[in-house]
Image (cartoon, rainbow, N blue to C red):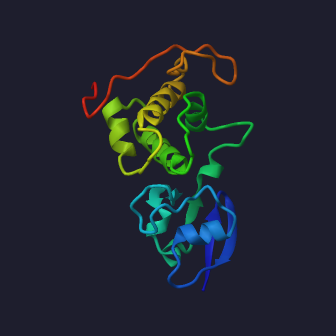
Amino acid sequence: MDIELTINGERTRVEAGSAEDLATVLRQHGYIGVKCGCDGGACGASKVFVDGEVRMACGMAAADADGSEIQTVAALGTQDDLHPVQQAFVDNFAVQCGFCIPGMIIQAVALLDSNPDPTEREVREALDDNVCRCTGYQKPVEAVLDAAGRTRGEESVAADGGRSVDGTPRRADLTGCCGGECDE
């Protein structure tokens, strides 16, 4: 069946089998930032915005997206002009193998759109359904908190206290949340 989608601002018609999920269709059409880690909507790696709402593309039938506006992680920024969340993930060394990161970034953008000043606990809860085997979540949490500060116009924060890619000084600001004992 043919379905019509607006993907990252570009209207297109794509062929989708009746049993295909949205993640498969997007990947078949070159949107490789959409990952498939579970084939059932449980790992968070396939997160995209569908009509402005975060959805797991591997848990959604492609036919159900017909007529929808889809935004993948690739639409958030470019290599030369990253979204503040993407830049914070880079600057805070929050990317290990990278497989889960597109879903985490989509979720983090949604969180910061609805709550520009989240607590560490709120960030951890937002990222809770993004399965990651590499990072231990500390660096991604630090990156989201850093991005929150950046979007509020505050000095960027990095756990290493180094300089951001643009040369702006960063201050060390390690978070103290381990094993569920988050500061509010």
Whether residue 119 is visible to the viewer of this picture, yes or no, is no
Position of residue 165 in the picture relative to residue 159 (left or right): right
Relative to 40, does residue 151 appear above or below in the rendering?
above
Whether residue 11 is visible to the viewer of this picture, yes or no, is yes
Task: Judge by depth and name the residue closer to the eye, 49 or 180.
Answer: 180
Q: Residue 34: name its quadrant.
A: bottom right
| Residue 126: % across, % down | 37, 44
Q: Residue at x 45, y 17 (%)?
A: 173
Task: Judge by depth and name the residue closer to the eye, 35 or 66.
Answer: 35
- Quadrant where the C terminus sits is top left
Position of residue 130 in the picture relative to residue 10 (left or right): left
Hey, which residue is sitting farthest left in the picture? 181
| Residue 118: % across, % down | 37, 32
Q: Residue at x 35, y 46 (%)?
A: 128
| Residue 119: % across, % down | 34, 29
Q: Residue 176: name its quadrant.
A: top left
- Quadrant where the N terminus sits is bottom right
Q: Residue at x 46, y 41 (%)?
A: 113
Hey, which residue is sitting farthest right in the picture? 80
| Residue 147: % across, % down | 51, 30
Q: Residue at x 27, y 33 (%)?
A: 179
